[in-house]
Image (cartoon, rainbow, N blue to C red):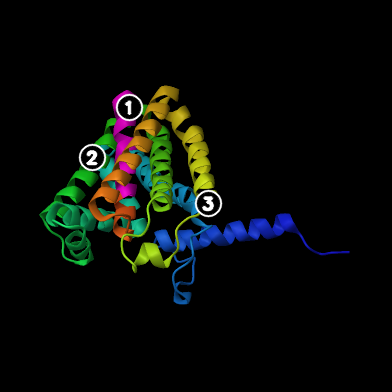
Amino acid sequence: MSNTDPAGADFRRGVSDFTQALGFLTRIPLADRSTGLPDFRDTAWTFPAVGVVVGLGGGIVYAVAAGVGLPPMLAAALAVTATILLTGALHEDGLADTADGFGGGRTATEKLEIMRDTRIGVYGATALVLSILLRVTAIAALAGLGAFPVLLIIVAAEAISRAGVVKMWNDLPAARPDGLSKDTGSPDARATTIALVVAAVIVAVTSIPAAGFWAALIASAATAAAVLVFTGICRNQIGGQTGDTLGAVQQVAGVTFLVIVAVFV
């Protein structure tokens, strides 16, 4: 009799995929980084689930801050700070580098060279300020819903924004022959489809009870549109994607979702 357990093997593989993604996208030390970069050709489907972890971190901080009576803006600022600490500002760094490159370079080569520079310029600083400001004010604007609904909306934003990363990563070729997005492999069609489905389920079970059907639907559609538009911008600017633009699209998607929910609730 065979001892093979396909269901058990699939579960263990899923846990391994999630652990690798969590270790890669956050500062939570669950993966062995000494073995090199993970291969996300078929494991990027877990990115929205990583977003749930990050969103829970920020959402719990918001709920605690609101529960002890802190003003909505301060509670929202602490929530956003928690998400940044959990990820080590990975996506914020990508946004800043992308803004500097796209804003300061004339050719694709110049843009890519600027994006490699670790120094931050005026375009990058402005993009960071706007991203943080928009997230904080959008979350604060949702305070009237109650602490738990806000927590759920933060979770939804973090999940759907990471599905946007997978989508753009799959849609665009690497803009340079080396670099992070090239070294880790591009998500295949199966991983991309699963990531989008997982994100849709997460958004449905979190943001619909928290914000209502129409707010969740419009915010999701606007986020998808923002990802597609930004994908087109990256194609036009540098001919593809880099690790920096993948971080930037997460920021674009997350901001879009939160702002649109705040507008429609």
Q: CA distance from mark 1 to mark 3?
A: 37 Å
Q: Is residue 71 visible?
A: no
Q: Earlier in the sequence, mark 1 or mark 3?
A: 1
Which quarter of the image is occupied by the N terminus?
bottom right
| Magenta region | 249-265
Q: CA distance from mark 1 to mark 2?
A: 17 Å
- Residue 139 is situated, as x and y percent measured from the top left of the image, at 30, 37
- Residue 117 is situated, as x and y percent measured from the top left of the image, at 19, 67
Which quarter of the image is occupied by the C terminus?
top left
| Position of residue 201 in the picture relative to residue 172 (left or right) | right
> Which amino acid, by three-letter code, is at mark 1?
Gly
Residue 144 badge: 1
Crowding at label 2, few (<14), some or many (≥20) Cα neighbours within 10 Å?
some
Residue 134 badge: 2
Residue 215 lies, with reference to residue 17, above or below; the image says: above
Q: Earlier in the sequence, mark 1 or mark 2?
A: 2
Label 3: which residue? 191
